[in-house]
Structures are given as structure tokens and as C-alpha cells.
Amino acid sequence: MITAPNLSRLDWLQHGFGQRSSDYPSFITTLRQVHSSLVVEAKGIGGDRIADGDALVTGPEGPLVGVRTADCVPILLADRRTHATAAIHAGWRGTAENIVAATVTDMAGRFGTVPADVVAAVGPSIGACCYEVGPEVVHRFETWVPDMEQTQEPRKVNLRAINELQLRNVGVADIWVSADCTFCSPGYYSFRRERDEAGRMLSFVGRKNMGRSMPSGA
């Protein structure tokens, strides 16, 4: 299990970015991920795949929230003042639709979150070393990488870096970014490497004592 140094400094918080062999807390609330910028609030005891969407937010008394990935970018947010938290699944479509900004804005509206109070961690995902896409996808990122505007050939895209930039643009400053590429490392599931045989990792965040241990592969 990978943890982010900045989130680890919050003594009220538990979090993790799963690997192929990780064990997870139970009772992690998740979504039916649809590669969107939809943000959903998790309330009460939560549940598995509670709604369509790709970002889950919850208040200080809410459940653990998590997302499943196997190359897409998992992003965890924690408000150090209000103790609201969020888990985000940012594939290329969600990144192109600026799902991180949508999530921070949603937290502000629901919980009074101020971006300067948000601690963010961008977890392991496919890296720019291995993520090549066609020009029709490349052009979706022109807003954040202007030199992509004239691209007519496939290019390698750094989704983690774009999400970090989007977080900074919305006012989040305390950001940790993993250097691990899920395609390069056999310790992670990778859809590009394993296709339909790929499992999924869970990344989760929430207040401590909100879940019990469960085996990997959930």
C-alpha cells in the first residue's frame, strides 16, 4: 500500500493507494465509474457502486470513499479544516473535463471547503513514459498544455502533471504526486499491459476507524 507523505501528516485521516497485493479496509464506498466529471456525495454507511460518477465527496462523519483504477489517475483530497474528503478517478476524459476542479468546487459548496485548506495526493497511474494517445485525444488537453494545439501525430501525455496543474489552478497548493507508472511496474494492475485480464486497485480516504481490514481483490 502506498501512502502520501502530506496526507500522512493529518493524524485524523486514513488513506492508501492500492497495489496488486494490497489489503484494504472494508466498507469503502465506491461508484460505478463512467469516465465523467460527475461528483457524488457519500452519506451514511455508504455502499459499493452507489451511483454513476467518478468523484466521491463526503463530510467529516461520512464513510471511507474510494475509486478503482488500473492506469487511470487516482486522486485523494482532504480538507484539513473541515475534515471533508474526496476520492477521484481521473481517466483521460475526466482529466479533459477538469474533474479535480469540479470536485473542489463541490466540496466548497457542500462543506465550506477553501482550496487553500485542501491537501491533495495524486497516486500511481500510467506515466508519460508509456501513455501515448492519438491527436484527437491530445487536443483535449490544449488548455493546460498549449503546445499540443498543433499536434497532428500521436503524443505521450502526462495525466498526473495535468491533474496537478488543474489542482493548482483552482487554488490547491499542498500536492504530492507519485512517480510510479502502473504500466512499467508489475506490482500494479495495468489495463494497457494486461487488457481484460487486469484487476483493479483501490485508492481510499476518510477518517480513521471507519473501516475494518479486508483482503485484496475486493
Image: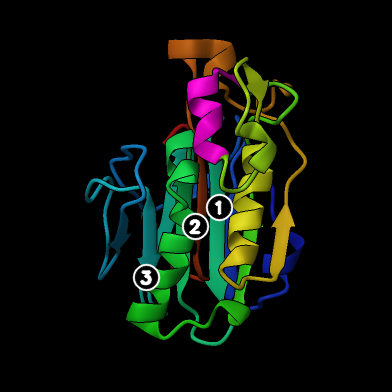
Camera-side mark, 1 or 3: 3
Label 1, secondary structure: give it.
Answer: strand
Callout 2–callout 3 Cβ contact below 8 Å: no
Label 2, secondary structure: give it.
Answer: helix
Q: CA distance from mark 1 to mark 3?
A: 15 Å
Earlier residue among tags 2 and 3: 2
- On the image, the x and y values in percent for residue 155 come to 66, 21
Residue drawn at x 23%, y 51% is 50
Q: CA distance from mark 1 to mark 2?
A: 8 Å
For mark 3, what is the residue?
A: 106
Examine the structure image and report whether residue 96 is included in the region drawn in magenta. no
For mark 1, what is the residue?
A: 75
- On the image, the x and y values in percent for residue 56 come to 37, 58
For mark 2, what is the residue?
A: 100
Q: Is residue 88 above or below residue 115?
A: above
Dot 2 amino acid type: Val
Callout 1–callout 2 Cβ contact below 8 Å: yes
Q: Which residues fall within the magenta stretch?
A: 132-141
Label 3, secondary structure: give it.
Answer: helix
Earlier residue among tags 1 and 2: 1
- Outermost residue on the left side: it is 51
Q: Is residue 36 above or below residue 177?
A: above
